[in-house]
């Protein structure tokens, strides 16, 4: 992280409660993310990981609580403010990767068309730079189907970098990838963090990946709808007071 401001709180979530209709999904969520961290959100299926991400990026409003992004209040933001905050954020969804009917370059233009008034040539120039940053120089005119699974994930990350975000959210970036490709993606995340100082918030279950990339982890529980553990992966492995958490990090099977 050389040369980048560190230790500044870039995301603050305080007393967050979230529900769909009347059904409570998250209760009393409290955490902060420091600039330049790789912060992992972990939890079983249905524990609210995607829900938390969607609230942080302002797709949903919480029942109560506070979400500050780089000092700006996402919960009370009007449309103009929300757009300003979203300009600091890049997102790559697990499912919503690239649009298959568009070239890589056309995919890259999408966030720039939404958030800037740059001329087309400038957008395409930026696309070239961002693709080079993720090791995909020269793929601009290809269709997503001409890229391997790992390359598609990289292209989606390049698109998330289009607006020079301070924070990038990745929802299960290595889903469906083999371990070697997945390890390559981990290295890319670390390289982008180290070279550009980007803060990453990553939803992932992949234990090797967590040990490689995560500075800190929070673990959500669908039973309590809250954070059951937070800390470094090694802290959670060695000294969490929650036995299930320790077992997860030691990769021990459940006792039957
Ligand atoms: N749009 C929605 N409307 C109603 N309920 C929803 C909606 N999205 C999610 N839920 C419910 O909220 C709970 C949390 O879902 P969420 O997708 O956030 O969990 P998750 O931890 O991301 O799960 P997974 O790992 O399976 O993706 C689940 O019970 C889910 O059924």
Image (cartoon, rainbow, N blue to C red):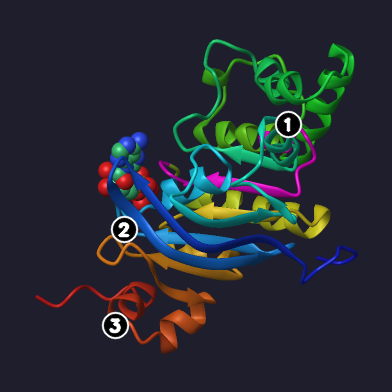
Q: Is mark 2 within 8 Å of ligand 1?
A: yes
* Residue positioned most to the left: 256
Looking at the magenta stretch, what is its main secondary structure? loop
Asked if labels 2 and 3 touch by Cβ distance under 8 angstroms, the answer is no
SS class of the residue under badge 1? helix
SS class of the residue under badge 2? loop
Viewed as shown, does residue 123 lie left or right of 44? right
Task: Determine whether 252 is above or below 97 in the image.
Answer: below
Residue stretch rendered in magenta on the structure? 160-176
**Residue position for label 3:** 243
Crowding at mark 1 (Cα within 10 Å: few <14, some 14-19, many 20+): few
SS class of the residue under badge 3? helix
Front position among marks 3 and 1: 1
**Residue position for label 1:** 80
**Residue position for label 2:** 44
Q: Earlier in the sequence, mark 3 or mark 2?
A: 2
Residue 98 at x, y percent in the picture: 55, 24
Tell whether position 142 is magenta: no
Residue 130 at x, y percent in the picture: 78, 34
Mark 1 to mark 2: distance in Å?
35 Å
Quarter of the image containing the N terminus? bottom right
Task: Determine whether 80 is above or below 85 in the image.
Answer: above
Q: Nearer the viewer, residue 32 or 245?
A: 32
Q: Earlier in the sequence, mark 3 or mark 1?
A: 1
Residue 140 badge: none
The answer to whether one can see residue 211 in this image is no
Q: Residue at x 33, y 42 (%)?
A: 20
Q: Residue at x 47, y 38 (%)?
A: 94
């Amino acid at each position: 992280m050389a040369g980048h401001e560190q230790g500044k709180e870039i995301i603050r979530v305080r007393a967050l409660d979230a529900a769909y209709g009347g059904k409570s999904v998250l209760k009393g969520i409290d955490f902060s993310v420091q600039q330049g961290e790789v912060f992992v959100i972990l939890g079983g299926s249905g524990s609210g990981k995607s829900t938390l991400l969607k609230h942080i990026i302002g797709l949903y409003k919480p029942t109560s609580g506070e979400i500050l992004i780089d000092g700006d209040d996402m919960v009370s933001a009007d449309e103009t403010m929300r757009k300003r905050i979203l300009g600091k954020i890049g997102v790559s969804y697990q499912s919503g990767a690239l649009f298959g009917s568009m070239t890589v370059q056309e995919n890259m233009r999408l966030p720039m068309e939404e958030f800037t008034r740059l001329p087309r040539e400038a957008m395409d120039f930026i696309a070239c730079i961002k693709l080079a940053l993720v090791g995909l120089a020269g793929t601009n005119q290809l269709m997503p189907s001409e890229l391997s699974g790992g390359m598609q994930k990289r292209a989606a990350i390049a698109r998330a970098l289009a607006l020079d975000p301070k924070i990038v959210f990745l929802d299960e970036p290595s889903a469906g990838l083999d371990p070697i490709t997945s390890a390559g993606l981990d290295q890319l995340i670390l390289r982008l963090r180290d070279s550009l100082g980007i803060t990453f918030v990553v939803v992932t279950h992949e234990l090797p990946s967590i040990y490689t990339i995560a500075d800190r982890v929070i673990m959500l529980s669908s039973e309590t709808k809250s954070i059951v553990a937070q800390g470094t992966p090694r802290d959670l492995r060695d000294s969490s007071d929650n036995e299930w958490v320790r077992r997860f990090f030691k990769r021990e099977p459940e006792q039957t």
